[in-house]
Amino acid sequence: MTKIDIFSGFLGAGKTTLIKKLIEEAYTGEKVVLIENEFGEIGIDGGFLKDSSIQINEMNAGCICCSLVGDFSEAIKKVITEFSPDRIIIEPSGVGKLSDIVSAVENIDMDGILLNGFATVVDAKKAKVYMKNFGEFYNNQVEHANAIIMSHTAGLDESKIEAVLELIREHNEHATVITTDWASLTGKQILEAIENEDTLNKAIERLEEEQHGHRHAEHHDHHHHSGECDDPDCDCREHHSHEQHGHRHAEHHDRHHHADEVFDSIGFETAKKFSVDFISDCLDRLQNFAVYGQVLRAKGIVEGENGSWTHFDYVPSEPDVRTGSAALIGRIVVIGAGIDKEAVRELFGL
């Protein structure tokens, strides 16, 4: 039997950090395969995790929850056939919809698979603003998790943590929620919360009810009499009833965007050498939304001027630049909304 764990979470929430903790503290003695999906063309996290001695299968052509669903199913089958793992960890893109990912796993036609848990990492410092600005993707990840693990709670005021907890409970009443700083918990404690059978069953029931309701709504729409849409703000050119159009128009704006309709990414491969000060300055400048667009995440592995290699992560107001292991080639990825790709390229001198 191969267990499958899914770790969802918006851009920069800390999924990779959590997975590394679990690999080191909870999955010991198991044969583990990590399947990653990066939004964009160039994957970075495989380099961050390569020292963990696990197989990494990166799929970068699109979002795991839309264009890659078919390939994803075949990838799971291939991994199980070739590696016979005890556990598969799925780390989807930060802008993926958890409901689609869980459905993709459930629809895999293969014996010997156990959907073991699907957790969402929520950045306690950014949950409120991201929930407001990117609710379609963000809320989906919260709503369909059976365990929600807050990140960046260390040193955060208790009232702020409570406020985030209230927001989470508005969207998910049943999930196990961890608010304690990860440093105070063992990986095994976190894994036990993720594997809670009661919350897992409730999350699956919610997803099935939502899917059934969506299918029922589509069937109901199909039987309306046709009419012409005259909404001046809509680009719909089909003829259908006003009621049917209103339903579909609302779905289009509320629930059914693909990630590449909302988010942009730009990625580079480069042999250029960068100083730590230069990278730090670039990350500071990325906070200027007027110039570069709304940058939500940047990360990279690049060669330094002295032969060392620099790893960096960025979420708004929280740059992290550090020394790490060498990569085959330098890589930089920037993700956000309304990104000026040429301005970002010029920023890094590429």
Image (cartoon, grey):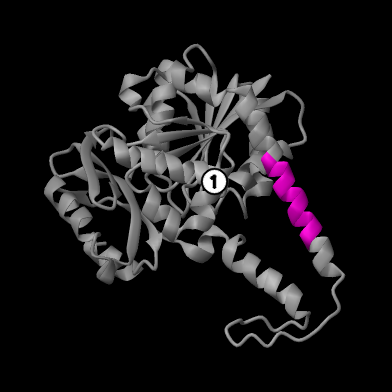
Mark 1 residue element = helix
* Residue at 53% across, 26% down: 194
Q: In the image, is residue 288 above or below residue 161?
A: below
Q: Height in image: 80 above or below 130?
A: above
Residue 291 rendering spot, x and y as whole percentages:
26, 70
Specify the quadrant that holds the N terminus.
top right
Q: Which residue is located at x 77 percent, y 83 percent?
A: 239
Count of numbered labels shown in the rendering: 1
Q: Is residue 130 left or right of residue 174?
A: left
Q: Quadrant of residue 336?
A: bottom left
Q: Nearer the viewer, residue 149 or 315?
A: 149
What secondary structure prevails in the magenta region? helix
Observer able to see residue 187: yes
Say which of 102 and 241 sits in front: 241
Label 1 amino acid?
His
Q: Is residue 210 magenta?
A: yes
Q: For mark 1, does the 10 Å Cα neighbourhood hold few (<14), some (14 to 19), or many (20 or more) residues?
A: some
Tell me: residue 241, above or below residue 38. Answer: below
Looking at this view, is 46 or 186 the one in front? 186
Left or right: 132 as drawn, with respect to 155:
right
The stretch drawn in magenta includes residue 331: no
Image-quadrant location for residue 246 = bottom right
User: Considering the image in quadrants, where does the C terminus appear?
Assistant: bottom left
Picture coordinates of residue 49, whole percent (x, y): 39, 31
Residue under numbered circle 1: 171
Query: Can residue 96 be seen in the rendering of this structure?
Result: no
Question: Image quarter for residue 173?
Answer: top right
Q: Which residues are magenta?
A: 206-217
The image position of residue 15, as x and y in percent, is 42, 37
Q: Where's residue 140, x and y in %?
A: 56, 49
The answer to whether 158 appears left or right of 62 in the picture is: left
